[in-house]
Image: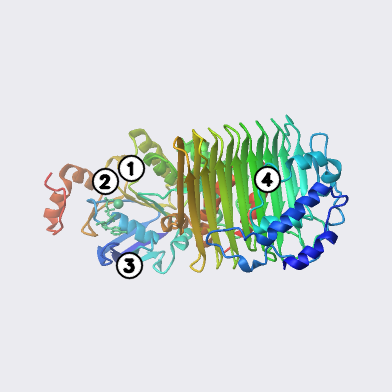
Amino acid sequence: MSEPIMKKLPELGLFPNEPAWFTDIRKTALKNYRNTKLPRFAKVHYEDWQLGELMTQVKPSIDQEMDCSTNDYILCTLATALMKHEKLVEKYYLQKALTTLTDRLVNFSTAFVNAGSFLYIPANTKLTKPILLPENSKTKFEQEISHNLIILGEGAQATIGIQSNGAGTAKTGHRISEIVLEANSHLNLINLDDFTAAQPIYLNRQASVGENAHLNWSIGSFSDGNVIAEMNAELVGRRAVATINNAAITSGKQTQGMNTRVTNFAPHSVGKIRQRGVILDESRLVFNGIGKIIHGAHGTIAEQENRILMLSDKASGDANPILLIDENDVEAGHAASVGRLDKKQLYYLMSRGLSKPTAKRLVVRGFIGELAKEIANPQIRQSFQKSLERKLPNA
Amino acid sequence: MKTLEIKDLHVAVKDEDTQKMKEILTGVNLTIHTGEVHAIMGPNGTGKSTLSETIMGNPRYHVTQGDILLNGKSLLKQAVDVRARAGLFLAMQYPAEIKGITNMEFLRAAINARRPEGAPIPIKDFLTQLDSALAILNMTSDMAERYLNEGFSGGERKRNEILQLLMIKPTFAILDELDSGLDIDALQVVSKGVNHVMGPDFGTLMITHYKRILKYIKPDQVHVMMGGRIVKTGDASLADRLEDEGYSGLRDELGIHVDLVDSEV
Ligand SMILES: Nc1ncnc2c1ncn2[C@@H]1O[C@H](COP(=O)(O)OP(=O)(O)OP(=O)(O)O)[C@@H](O)[C@H]1O
Ligand SMILES: [Mg+2]
């Protein structure tokens, strides 16, 4: 595999007028790609999903130069950003959120990146309206390998909703997102994943949360196909706060494996992970919740709760909380469960006339919909609930 | 007029520990018509809740003999939700709590379950009904927005059961120890709620330990249950007598052989 790829590099998807430093990063990643391993997702077998393999000639698409910037912020493709805002991209690209290229997939994605968006909200810009990004790029990618950068300058405030339903026409999709919150910034980030069943998807989302910054992150993992996802928030500044709420539903024969991680690097930082999953049919869902506290991060809080509701005998699921603590003065806790529908609850609802499917639906929706209530923006919350409903069975 | 008939009902339940079937009801006979109020009294553990749950269709209780008929039609093969839609309602002694579902959502789903598919109750009509039901029960609207019974106090749960009764308007309601856990004022309010649905098209079976609630909801008949069956039926004065004499007097008078755990107190 590596040899043909090596040959392809010069002619393959470089962005228009791509700066040399950027191409150098590609080259380094390509070298690493040859001697790194697939990332580990405990209890998920995805080796035969063909992730990290080149399917087609990866070319940047024709509308790489789209620019939707406003007076308040920069929003454009990565390709455009490399031309118009090169210094900014250079400052943040693989510099703050994702800093080491340790595994095969991240190296693959970095070497062959052919898409992505760039969103920069300057310091002290407080947006009242949410930014909604449909990532079902109308672009003509065959194999999307994208890298998205979201940056909130110091004291900036924003709500960003990102809905994803496809990643090109090739057999796989790769998507990296870096999210940087500079000091005192405040971000409500909602990722709504609705990828189709057709492609296995690799998601790697890395957030860096600066001093006194707040990240409120809700993820709806409602895709129909196989997905592995890393969701990672690093609390690098004092009093940084990150909450990751992940709601996942698996159905059919799909597998979704999620490594959801918060690392407390700085003192008095607060990290919370809440994952709720519902497993249907013959599907598989794995939550690996990882809370890590680095030595010296005193007075920190790390909490996580991973709960899975299993609705089928043929389904399987795991909720693995992992706490890695290298500091004494901390508050850390975890809860995990894989359970079935509560018969008493179903009976109670049915005793009021609700049919069994309706009662089940209500209990399940209640279980997972609790996370939807955390989304403050009504419009985004509604889309979230709509996706959730779509994914739940009628009977 | 509609009729709920219990005929020679025998019910067994599987003991979770020993996995053995244990007979609880040993031949209950009871007929209730709409327009009537019946009360059942009886010592703890005698099978009153078992009777209620069995009528409603709780799958944990197994009917080994006899029948339950609504307007002459057997309910035994009907699932709990079918019975509910046929007009039965049980205010439970221990209602479940469900996180993530608001009271309001639940009530709407319950009402819509009784309507033709694709014709849900218009939201405005629903809210009008809800407001008036809340007002009858002195409940605030935030109770309707809270998760179903979650974190509700014992008394609030009972009140919430009656809120559902008011909204659903069943034909027959079984109220299992509605009065337990209610303070003196709450008892009056909740009774007011029950009286509100009372009428010629509504019948009720109340299970209680105390005659106090019978002051507010006047029974036509009072039944005494002991050893898994009804051993005596009378009018409201039977409740007075029981309160004065306890159950042992009646047991001895009738010559029944059942153990009353607390009879010597
Ligand atoms: N699901 C069950 N599993 C095992 N035993 C049960 C179950 N339900 C009832 N029983 C037993 O059946 C008997 C009757 O219980 P039931 O709850 O019907 O009594 P009750 O008359 O309602 O009592 P109380 O006045 O205390 O409410 C008791 O001995 C009880 O332990
Ligand atoms: Mg009882």
User: What residue is disc 1 on?
Assistant: B179
Of discs 3 and 4, which sits in the foreground?
Answer: 4
- Residue A240 in percent (x, y) is at 59, 35
Residue at 64% over, 53% down: A102
Q: CA distance from mark 1 to mark 2?
A: 8 Å
Graded by Cα atoms within 10 Å as few (under 14), some (14 to 19) or many (20 or more), the crowding at tag 4 reads: many
User: What residue is disc 4 on?
Assistant: A380
Q: Is residue B176 left or right of residue A310?
A: left
Q: Do badges 2 and 3 share one subunit? A: yes
- Residue A58 in percent (x, y) is at 80, 61
| Residue toward you, A184 or B153 | A184
Disc 3 element: strand
Q: CA distance from mark 3 to mark 1?
A: 28 Å
Q: Do badges 3 and 4 share one subunit? A: no
User: What residue is disc 2 on?
Assistant: B209
Circle 2: residue type:
His
Of discs 4 and 2, which sits in the foreground?
Answer: 4
Of discs 1 and 4, which sits in the foreground?
Answer: 4
Residue at 58% over, 50% down: A246
Dot placed on the residue nearer the N-terminal end, 1 or 2: 1
User: What residue is disc 3 on?
Assistant: B63
Circle 3: residue type:
Val
- Residue A222 in percent (x, y) is at 63, 56
Q: Do badges 1 and 4 share one subunit? A: no
Residue A150, above or below B221: above
